[in-house]
Amino acid sequence: MTAESTSTYPNDWTIKYHRQFNLRRTLVGILGIAVVAYIVFLFATGNLQWSKTLAYLFDYRILTGVGYTLLYSVLAMVIGIAGGSLLAIGMMSRNIVWNTLSKGYVALFRALPLIILLLIFYNIAIFLPYIGFGPFQLNVNSVVTPFLAAVLGLALHEAAYMAEIVRAGVNGVNRGQSQAAEAIGMTYWQSLRSVVFPQATRLIVPPTANQFISMLKNTSLVVVIAGNDLLTVTKELYSNNFLTIELLFVAAIWYLVMVLIFGWLAHLIELRFNRGA
Amino acid sequence: MTDQMMKSHFLRVEHLDKWYDDFQVLSDVSIDIDQGEVICIIGPSGSGKSSLLRCVNNLEKIDGGRIYLEDELIGMAPYKDGFVRLDGPVAAGQRQKFGFVFQQFQLFPHMTVLENVTVGPIRVKGESRAAAEKRGRDLLDKVGLADRATSYPSGISGGQQQRVAIARALAMDPQVLLFDEPTSALDPELVGEVLKTIKDLAHAGYTMLVVTHQLEFAQKVADRVVFFDHGKIVESGPPETVLKSPQDPRTQAFISAIQTEV
Ligand SMILES: Nc1ncnc2c1ncn2[C@@H]1O[C@H](COP(=O)(O)OP(=O)(O)OP(=O)(O)O)[C@@H](O)[C@H]1O
Ligand SMILES: [Mg+2]
């Protein structure tokens, strides 16, 4: 193995490969570099004040927007996971009412564009000014802030997607496992809780981490109801100072940073969960 | 009804029918089993042996016939002019009376060996962890795996996994043990240790229904051998008769096929 042993036992059968010059490959490579260089050139010479982008990158208003974007993502995911798990159980239930309701919910909320949901929740007071019964009446207008509308819209949308992920996870657990659980006298719920769900987690967590990353980007739709998220504050800033592209780049950089960080975390989670079993 | 009550056997399977959609997997299957009796079921692949066991402990709904354990109707209850299928805690309570050992072991992979054995007593019977673990260790000792309590199923051999599965079934103090080809998924050198464990249980007086292709085992352990084909009982009787001088040509063909398969 070592250089020494090679010299002691010269091996005439080894092959030393060289890379031969290939004109086509070289030209294709040069073309790629040229395209990238041209794009960089356009951005560098365009009507853009890069210094402004830098200046706004850590502006406290932008940072607040980043905070809201993260908050929306986390809240919507937490509610979405809980709701999606219930929906998944409903979809697998033999109770025809819950089965139909859950499947209907998933079909409906996956069909509606998220932006429509956000607008509907934001304007819900128009058709539902008060909710409650008897003396307990709630003025919907005073409750449904952009914040609440944003969380509800994102979470209810997410729940539909999580329902399918959880269901796929549960279905991915060998049928024999729930039979074995039932054979030692567990009820359906006990077998779900102690046997099926713990094993389904392995299948559920990686796609859920990916959902979180999509969610980070989807929160930007909250801009249509002015929900204080990163894109909303970005838009407010540039409508005042007209540094449109500079500020959009600020937002783009932050989305990129968040997605890269959480994408890396998701990758670690995935590795961890694939290692078990 | 009245004459059935008089000659009441411990476990009665009466005129069982089972359909999967439009395919009849069991037709008119009747077996009476006394306490402590060991029945071995043999028969070709797809003849419905596994289905029979799953019906006996109500893992599957039956379409005709009755199953009684100690005169208790299994899996259903009379209702109006018919029956309702039992589910929920009542059905779960009945299933506890049957220990089931699967061909593919079906240990819970996210639990240690000891947890596999104690999860039933703790979760289902509500026993204290300490009591369940003490009993669990005794059972693991009985199947020769006392030193593997903290291993995970993926870390032990197939034969050991199957013995843990047996301990897990025993932990619920079942009245009947159902084995579905317990050694078919094992490498040949591991078959013996599992068969020995089952044989010990037979000698300890457990009532057992064992689906197996191990004719030699059936010969030694069974009180009765049942030959099954196309969802029907073709022949049943003491092992010497069914295995050594089978009457029905289908039984003869099956047994000679198994014995020449080398
Ligand atoms: N859940 C099911 N749905 C539909 N058909 C089924 C189902 N389970 C079993 N069957 C069919 O019923 C027949 C009997 O199956 P079963 O598993 O009871 O046979 P078996 O005698 O145990 O065979 P083997 O020796 O291969 O285990 C087979 O043809 C099988 O394809
Ligand atoms: Mg089978």
Image: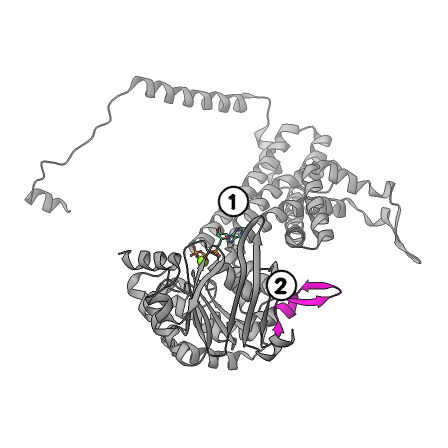
Query: In the rendered structure, which segment of residues is drawn in magenta?
Result: B71-91
How far across and how far down the image is residue B170, in percent?
A: 47, 75
Q: Is residue A85 left or right of residue B260?
A: right
**A124 vs A98: above or below:** above
> Is B73 a magenta residue?
yes
- Residue B169 % position (x, y): 48, 72
Name the residue located 29 percent from the left edge and 60 percent from the top edge: B259
SS for callout 2: helix
Question: Circle 1: is it few (<14), some (14-19), or many (20+) Cα within 10 Å?
Answer: some
**Mark 2 — on which chain does it sit?**
A
Q: Distance between the residues labelled 2 and 1?
A: 34 Å
| Residue A189 badge | 2
Q: Tell me, yes or no, if residue B113 can be seen here.
A: no
Q: Where is residue A208 in the image (x, y as percent from the top left)?
A: 57, 48
**Is A157 in the magenta?**
no
The structure's colour scheme is one colour
Q: Considering the image in quadrants, where does the C terminus of chain B appear?
A: bottom left
Residue located beneath label 1 in the image: A263
Q: Which residue lies furthest to the front in this view?
A: B247
Rate crowding at label 2 as few (under 14), some (14 to 19) or many (20 or more) other CA atoms within 10 Å.
few
Look at 44% across and 51% down and name the residue there.
A271
| Residue depicted at x 39% and y 56% | B250
Nearer-the-camera pick, A261 or B78: B78
Please determine if labels 2 and 1 lie on a single subunit: yes
